[in-house]
Image: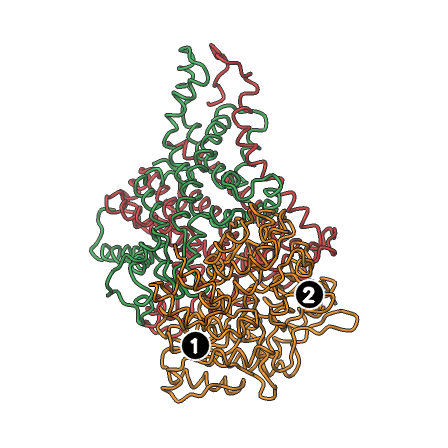
Amino acid sequence: MYDKEKQLAEDFVAKKIGRRDLIKGMSALGVTTALASTLVNAAATRALAQNGFNWRAHEGTTIKLLLNQHPYTDAMIANLENFKALTGMDVQYDVFPEDVYFDKVTAALSSRSSEYDAFMSGAYMTWTYGPAGWIDDLNEYIMDPSKTNPDYNWEDVLEGVRKSCAWNGRPGGALGSDDAMQWCIPLAYEQNNLTYNKRVFDANGLSVPTDLDSLVDTAAAAKTAMGDGYGIGVRGSRSWATIHPGFLSGYSNFGQSDLTVAGDGTLSAAMNTDVSRNFHSKWVEMIQNSGAPDWSTHTWYQVGTDVGAGKSAMMFDADILGYFMNGAGNAEAGNLAFSAFKANPDAAAPTPNIWIWAMAMSSFSTKKDATWYFLQWVTGPEHQLFGAQDMDLVNPARSSVWADEMFRNKLSASYSGYVDMHDVSAPGASIKFTAQPLFFDLTTEWAAMLQRMVAGEVPVDEGLDMLAESVNSQLAEAGLR
Amino acid sequence: MESTSLIERILRGIAITVVILFFMFPIFWIFLMSLQTNETILRVPPSMVFEPSLQNYRALITGQLETQTGTLEIRFMGNLFNSFFLSTTSVAIGLLLGVPAAYAFARLKFRGSEDIAFTLLSFRFAPPLLVLLPLTIYFQQIGLANTYGGLIWVYQLIVLPLILWIVRGYFEDIPADVEYAYRIAGHDFWATFRKIALPLAGPGIAAAGLLAFIFAWNNFIFALVLASADKQPVTVGALAFITASGIQYGQIAAGIILSIAPTFALALYAQRYLVEGLSLGAVKG
Amino acid sequence: MSDTSFNAPPRRRFKVSRKFLPYVLSLPALLTCIGILIPFFTAVWYSLQRYRLSQPWNRGFNWGENYLNFMTDDAFWNTLQVSLTYAFFAVTAQLLLGLGIALLLQKRTMFNNFVSIMLLMPLMTAPALAALMWKLMTNPGFGILSYLASLIGLEDFRWASDPQTAMLTVVIVDVWVYTPFIMILLLAGLRSLPKQPFEAAALDGVPRLFVFWRITLPMLTPFLLTATLFRVIESIQQFDIIYAMTQGGPGNTLTVFQVEAYLNFFQSTNVGRSAALLMILWAITYVLSNIFIKNWLRLREKQRGEA
């Protein structure tokens, strides 16, 4: 019924006509942009079907996914029909609220459930799931031409992100080493940078901070200028999630790390150095003077909601959180702007720590080859481009998508400074934690200590010594020191 | 007692007002929130002046949640159904198993009966996580994971001890002579149980069932750990409004109101039994 | 009196031996619950191991080491202390408040009955949802309670996000949810007390405070004890409210047993420690529930004697 439209879409995918011609042609035929993009993706899918790879090898198979409630999931579901059409497979899924999502994953995997064939994971979580024997090394699929379609283009996935998902399983082992297992494949990732309220900054003559000291000062100035509201949003709940965004990004920019790995592979705490003490003092002071009054309960949600509602002047957190909060429905929609942030004035470039939403394959799946078909499709260039252009699959993990003019224009049109920010900080973006099985214990304890410092219960110096001591004894207890 | 002075009456009036305020205000306020959009909720200072809107309820009932980044499908109605189904079935099964057992413990003293009854009640007080965490593994092995059946079984942990103990008390209160007379008249054991014991213990059974229903409805942790998304009750479902792309305060409020409404209605409708149930059968109204 | 029951049943339609009848009646219930014992023993077994899901190669029996480690583990003592503090404050507040309200509503009037039913509403609210409600009301931006606090001069009152007031906040939520339970139990108790002692005291012109201390309170003691024990057992196991409000924070101010065990299992995947923590909690509640059940039985006997 959409023959002409389909032809236009095919031509576009085959690069016979340009984007503008496509849109002109489509609108001449009375097609909405949304329908047009679905048609284009359907055409892309058909093109995919013709690359010589047997996409229908698992026709009739049903797989089940465990997914987190997230815009990435929305993008996946929106495009699912195309995957079904391509492969003749069926895909079922369970979506859980983020608050309980990982508990659910742990419950399913630790009970060795074969219910779910694949699931969304963060890279940090695979440091538990991998050694526990719950997920498969995906290298054996990626490297096998009989299982992976020729257009998959693994090298297209950004190196820092790709390697951050690979670990050899040895406590302290470098991420992405040659003997590493690919525990998961990135869907998209977040860098931690500054999102600031341009309206507030302009009205009060504030300039965008360029290092930690100016961040502390600007936050204080913003708080004074705003009256009610506060200067800077960072996370503060008693959880690993407090450590990994802005905090660790700034921390590692000063060349600091969480643990040191000795030559013999043993680990020890590294957060009580002088540089670290200095960083902690400034961070704590910043929260005390210009952070949220209820900082210690702030998670992703509150940090984002407040900057979107104009209650905070800026946040040092995930860039994509700023992206969401700049959308319709927020009081400050369109007022948010983005800037790469380098905490250390002497550093050459920003080194954001990153969070990766990735797909992992359950070791208990009984349909692994079929599941791999889904994984290579959902992490492949076509779906990523669709997600980035038409849905909110930001930041896509593939360089080909970042090179796409349409995607870049979409970002630049409504997200001031976003593309530049990404281009500046992406080369230094990777996971800055030491991969080891006590990740969640140690980061939760770190966050709890940070809370005590901010509450004034412990001085920073003393707190860091206590933390280091406790970390060392836990490492020793687990046989890692 | 009759000679209450004016001052005392005023003081009493103030005290009761404060008490009512403390206990009722949160529900009232959340109800107001449920009629507002995020925009009016986020006003500072909070205000009671707003244009009421049913859009939050509409979103929950139609399952279309409007967020900053688009429309999100939610299955709050499905959660509500699960709560109904799980609580009702659990209580029904709990009564089916618990009432005969309660009768046995009350009437037919047998070897070990006190110990068994005691053990059963003490299950009510075991830390739920202690049982739940290993249970995930066993449920997987015997195929009960992600099934209503498995959940209903675990719900017996809260439901059954309550029923057993409350109903047992009521059976013990029935004078044995009444039943004895009926049996002398030529009726067998089962007929006596059905025609005499059950009706006489009726209020106790209703009280126990009601209380068990409320405990089952309010449970949060069992389904969360043991079941897949399509079997979650409202207590877990209400968390779904906290999304990566923002918190939908109005919908959280509406979700809370919708999920407490059934237990409220039940409490109002069957208040007498509720009061008896809450005193664990120790005091009969 | 109930033992004289059925010694000579006249006619039997289908034969279940007298000896087995009670077992036939109670077995289904017993079997249903006994299934619970298997995971219980599994947990005991886990608690005796060094067992962390992320380090399967390290797994092995260390016998009592998980328990021994608690002796020198500050986090454990903190958990114990926080759990007991929480239970103490929550139950004490509920008891005083519940008793006060029960006394206020003691007279059987239409109004009092109506109020007592309305006051049950918080108890009908799932604790997890109640925590969510209070979280909305204590939000520093738009929360009505934060606003009211600022009106009475508490400008920067931070509720659950300040370690100084976090315990207070969750205790208030617990009090909000569970005071009605104590209130209704005590109200039922008050109304079931015999009238004569009070009438006699009134005739003699005994001061009412004296009546309260010397007659009401002693006669109410079994009810008070029952309510207290029941609530202590439950509040020492509190999970929903605390987890939903702060996940145990800020700092380590609210890491009660079940929250700590949950985080140990799901985040650190330290199964051994998690199980050992829960075993200690179980031991505490087992002792308490023994006392509770005995007391409750006595109370019921007494009530029946007077009825």
Figure quadrant of the N terminus of chain A = bottom left
Query: Is C256 placed above or below C38 here?
Result: below
Give the number of the mark in front: 1 or 2: 1
Which of these two is toward me, C266 or C299?
C266
Circle 2 crowding by C-alpha within 10 Å: few under 14, some 14–19, many from 20? many
Q: Chain of mark 2?
A: A
- Is any atom of residue A299 visible in this view? no
Dot 1 corresponds to which residue? A415
- Is any atom of residue A15 visible in this view? yes
Query: Is C58 placed above or below B183 here?
Result: below
Amino acid type for the residue under numbered disc 1: Tyr
Which of these two is toward me, B282 or A471?
A471
Dot 2 corresponds to which residue? A167
Residue B227 is situated, as x and y percent measured from the top left of the image, at 52, 47
Residue plotted at (45% across, 18% down): B190
Q: Chain of mark 1?
A: A
Residue A18 is situated, as x and y percent measured from the top left of the image, at 45, 72
SS assignment at label 1? loop
Q: Are marks 1 and 2 in contact (CB under 8 Å)?
A: no
Q: Calculate the distance from the C-alpha at mark 1 to the C-alpha at mark 2.
A: 34 Å
SS assignment at label 2? strand
Q: Which chain is orange?
A: A
Amino acid type for the residue under numbered disc 2: Trp
Circle 1 crowding by C-alpha within 10 Å: few under 14, some 14–19, many from 20? many
Q: Which chain is green?
A: B
Which of these two is toward me, A453 or A100?
A100
Which of these two is toward me, A62 or A206?
A62
**Colour in which chain C is shown?**
red
For marks 1 and 2, the one nearer the N-term is 2
Residue A46 is situated, as x and y percent measured from the top left of the image, at 51, 58
